[in-house]
Image (tube, helix red, strand yellow):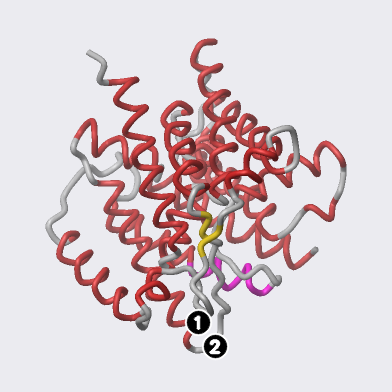
Amino acid sequence: MIKEMTLGLVVGLAFGYALQRGRFCMSSAFRDILLMRDFSIVRAYVLAVLVQMVGVRALGDLGILPIQVVPFYWLAAPVGGFVFGGAIALAGGCASGTLYRVGEGMVGSMVALIGYALGTAATSLGSLSGVSGLLQQWEVTLGGSDPTLPGLLGISAWVPIAVFVLAGFLWLRKGGGRVYSGGWGWSLTGPVLGLVGVVAWLASSATGRHYGLGITDSTGSLLYFIVEGESGMLDWGSFLVVGMPIGAAIAAVSHHEFKLRAPGPARILQQLGGGFLMGVGATIAVGCNVGHSLTGVSVMALSSMVSTAFIILGVWTVSSLLFMRG
């Protein structure tokens, strides 16, 4: 447990610090494309994925790192992804965005986090577990290959990696965009998050958990530990989740950006409901924007790529209803 706690907290602190300094939230990233035609945060996201894509695959090929991917449940991935995407638009932040905003002192995000934990626990262990079980009945397998894009195409992983890196480079070199006042631009945020992601794979693997950044199951496990006192539910990811808001708080306090802020009652209820649906959607899809969009896409897992596409669709659908009705 000491190893899990130490490595989880260290990575969580670094992850939370980087999220706060880069104002990195995928709900904002995907919403800004629709509402403002601003790709700043998306550029940071693409960079983070490309850094992990190269780094994790290289470590895997060298035999340093076992690479595991999420199973591809062909119905659960789009349904859960869409629910999660709509929910983060309601909650005003994705899983990572909610956690770093907790560290900034935003009460609404604290409420959304509580809802997220409740939704995760209800769908994985509680009254809604039958829903996830129903949607996760149908799994796509590729014979002896992992359910990834290279496995589907029957080619070396380095072929699509080369294509993605080249396409990403050509697109990113044209980018300008906003820079968060007093914080990091996308050209720094992306590589830092990508490197944190690679280190997360190594740190997690050292504890027997062969995956990178991911917070959905760990958030539900933390709630179960708090309620039941069952320490066996805690793992590397649990301490990662604990460390994230602390790292964000360190960043916010050190840059004079920490301040307790609370929205009105209606907004609080919306964020609680949005947080709960985040937990439901992430559990159905077997991952949130961190486990799928940031980590799973970097290893080209089919489940993560499909889930991310539907997360974006969910964000756009609910954002258009909330902000574009007029």
Q: Position of residue 16 (x, y in %)?
A: 52, 49
Task: Give the residue type that dot 2 points to.
Answer: Gly
Name the quarter where the C terminus is drawn: top left
The residue positioned 66% from the left and 46% from the top of the image is 133
Task: Give the residue type that dot 1 points to.
Answer: Gly
Pick the residue in front: 288 or 78.
Answer: 78
Q: Position of residue 296 (x, y in %)?
A: 47, 61
Is 204 within the magenta?
yes
Dominant secondary structure of the magenta stretch? Answer: helix
Residue at mark 2: 63
Check the image and name the residue furthest to the right.
Answer: 229
Give the image quarter of residue 50. bottom left
Res. 182 mark: none
Whether 85 is drawn above or below 208: the answer is above
In the image, the segment drawn in magenta is: 198-206
Residue at mark 1: 60
Q: Residues within 10 Å of mark 1 (few under 14, many from 20)?
A: few
Query: Label 2's element?
Result: loop
Q: Are marks 1 and 2 in contact (CB under 8 Å)?
A: yes
Query: Label 1's element?
Result: helix
The residue positioned 47% from the left and 39% from the top of the image is 94
Q: Position of residue 237 (x, y in %)?
A: 65, 56
Q: Residues within 10 Å of mark 2 (few under 14, many from 20)?
A: few
The residue positioned 20% from the left and 71% from the top of the image is 166
Kindly report the distance in space between the C-alpha atoms of the residues bearing marks 1 and 2. 5 Å
The residue positioned 69% from the left and 52% from the top of the image is 238
Pick the residue in front: 154 or 238.
Answer: 154
Name the quarter where the N terminus is drawn: bottom right
Is 101 within the magenta?
no
Q: Position of residue 86 (x, y in %)?
A: 43, 32
